[in-house]
Amino acid sequence: MLFASVPRNMIDDSRSLAERSDQLEDIFTDLRRAFPEIEFELDAASRTVNAQAIDHGDIRIVRLYGGLAFHRLIDHDGLVLTLLHEIGHHLATGGRLTVNSKLACECMADRWALTKGAARLEKRTGRSFAIDNAVANLDRLTIPPKDGAASRNDAGPRICWGWNWPKRKRLLAKRGGSLPLVRNCPMPDHYVLQNSHH
Amino acid sequence: MGTLFPIGGGPDNEIINTLDKLFSGANFKALVKHRTESGEDLFDKNHRLTRVAARIGAYPARDYGSDPAKKKWFYFLHKELNKATQDAIKRILGDALKNPKIKAVSFSVEENTAAAHPHLFPSNDEPLANYLDTTRAVYLVKMIVKKQLDDGNVDDPPGDNDPDKSDSGSNLEHPIKWPAFKGSRRQFAKRRKPRA
């Protein structure tokens, strides 16, 4: 959010922009119908290539930033998976993020997106997406990690392996909708431990 | 805040984790102890956030190639945070170190192009209780920023030759004693005595 970690590559011709805007409007309309408990926002002015699940007390927001919404290399499937993943942070049960115990961790958000989230979206609106295409789509956006920087994943319970996005994506593509629970995920234990101090 | 691409790939993750680690557990206790033993209030009006950040190691330290993350972070603290936001952060962190009910401070960042300038959520002027989480033992410092930092805006932190000073010009700084590093030692099973 403060530092750009995914390269920008935004659509710049008016026709493609108009097509993408229409596509986004359709997707958001369906998501609002399928998940009325969530507020969806498109921050079109932002050039950040990302999306975020935001918890403002009673208000649960999913915000898609312009850099991702209008990225040249993303398509329908990538956008739907992205948004379902963010909804998953709000609605999934199980492991939590250390920074905010109200939000599900990355693994649980993925798992929810592929199972309950995708099913509810299709049932209520008829919208579906191809997981392998969505994952390949998002893969294209990321840069290969630099030595000693982006690839490094601190050991210890504060960072779940789920932060390792490339590994998570490979698993997603391989397992499709049956992403297993991570047996060695330390987050639930850590969460319990952390809260027991309070 | 959950994000699609882990803020994680880069310095965002590093700075948030560094801040969380500094303001929780043994490090947080060390900062509390520093205040009580030395009498130095790291977040009073005479201390600069940039100098304190440099002293306690609250900055992204890894090499991010062409991204001068550390210098951009110090520019952010020094030039992009206005006085009201700096004071709001100091108010929370200062209270965290003197209020025995507080066990940690948790940091997060949210981007919103509607924001006029970086500020705390919901605002800089909330009563302190409004920044507490549901356990009432953790302060939540949630920063709202308008956009990502520009690569061209860089700044260096104040060095040891530029310490924080009192109104009368005396050096306010005392060395901070951090918890000793404890390496984990692998436990091996006892070797059996070889049979004769």
Image: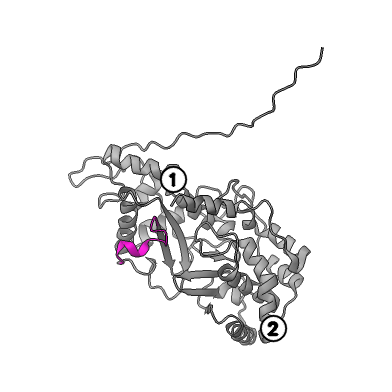
Task: Tell me where residue B12 appears, x and y as whole percent.
Answer: 52, 58
Q: CA separation, marks 2 and 1?
A: 50 Å
Residue hosting label 1: B57
Q: Residue furthest right?
A: B196
Residue hosting label 2: A123
Task: Tell me where residue B125 appears, x and y as whole percent.
Answer: 30, 67
Q: Nearer the viewer, residue A120 or B51?
A: A120
Left or right: residue B96 versus residue A12 is: left
Provide the residue span drawn in magenta.
B126-138
Reply yes or no: does residue A140 show up in magenta: no
Q: Residue A151, labelled with which disc?
A: none
Task: Tell me where residue A110 appears, x and y as whole percent.
Answer: 66, 66
Q: Nearer the viewer, residue B79 or B135?
A: B135
Task: Tell me where residue A184 appears, x and y as whole percent.
Answer: 67, 51
Left or right: residue A12 versus residue B156 is: right
Q: Quadrant of the C terminus of chain B?
A: top right
Pinpoint the chain carrying mark 1: B
Q: Which element type, helix, strand or loop, lies under badge 2?
A: helix
